[in-house]
Image (cartoon, rainbow, N blue to C red):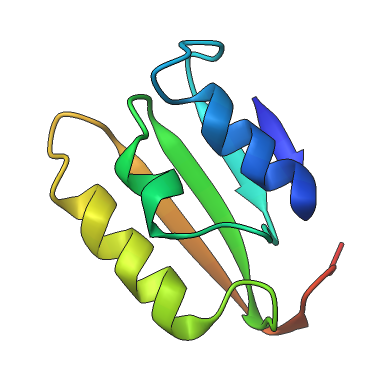
Amino acid sequence: AVGYCFGGLYALLAGGPLHLADAVVGCHISLTNRSNFEQLEVPTAIACAQEDSQFSDSLRDEAQQILARKADIPSKFLLTKGTAHGFA
């Protein structure tokens, strides 16, 4: 599942207990919280903007820590310097 902005939330949800996706990619995601990352069960990649009011540095750090603890599930965060929420 791939989701951009608020669609990122739905991609994350698809990668959880509903088993609607085999992998998740989120780009400049928004409307997410800690529990959205805790419930992930599939490989996940997140493309992040350097300046993002919708996905704060603290939430990004927390999400990275949550996924790092899931050693059996690959995850990757890409922080794109010089960008803001909604970059293309």
Q: Which of 6 and 45 is in front in this view?
A: 6
In the depicted view, which residue is nearer to us: 76 or 39?
39
Marker count (numbered): 0
Q: Residue at x 34, y 36 (%)?
A: 39
Residue sitting at x 55%, y 31%:
13
Q: Where is residue 65 in the image (x, y as percent from the top left)?
A: 23, 63
* x, y percent for residue 57: 48, 83
Q: Quarter of the image for the N terminus: give it.
A: top right
Q: Quadrant of residue 14?
A: top right
Counting from the top left corner in percent of width and height, residue 5 is at 77, 55
Q: Quadrant of the C terminus?
A: bottom right
Expressed as whole percent of the image width and height from the top left, the position of residue 8 reads: 68, 45
The residue sitting at 44% across, 70% down in the picture is: 60
Q: Which quarter of the figure has residue 11? A: top right
Please tell me in which quadrant of the rendered image residue 25 appears: top right
Question: Along the horizontal axis of the image, is 67 left or right of 88?
Answer: left
Whether residue 36 is situated above or below residue 40 in the rendered picture: below
Left or right: residue 26 versus residue 79 is: right
Q: Residue at x 77, y 82 (%)?
A: 84
Q: In this view, does 2 lie above or below 63?
A: above
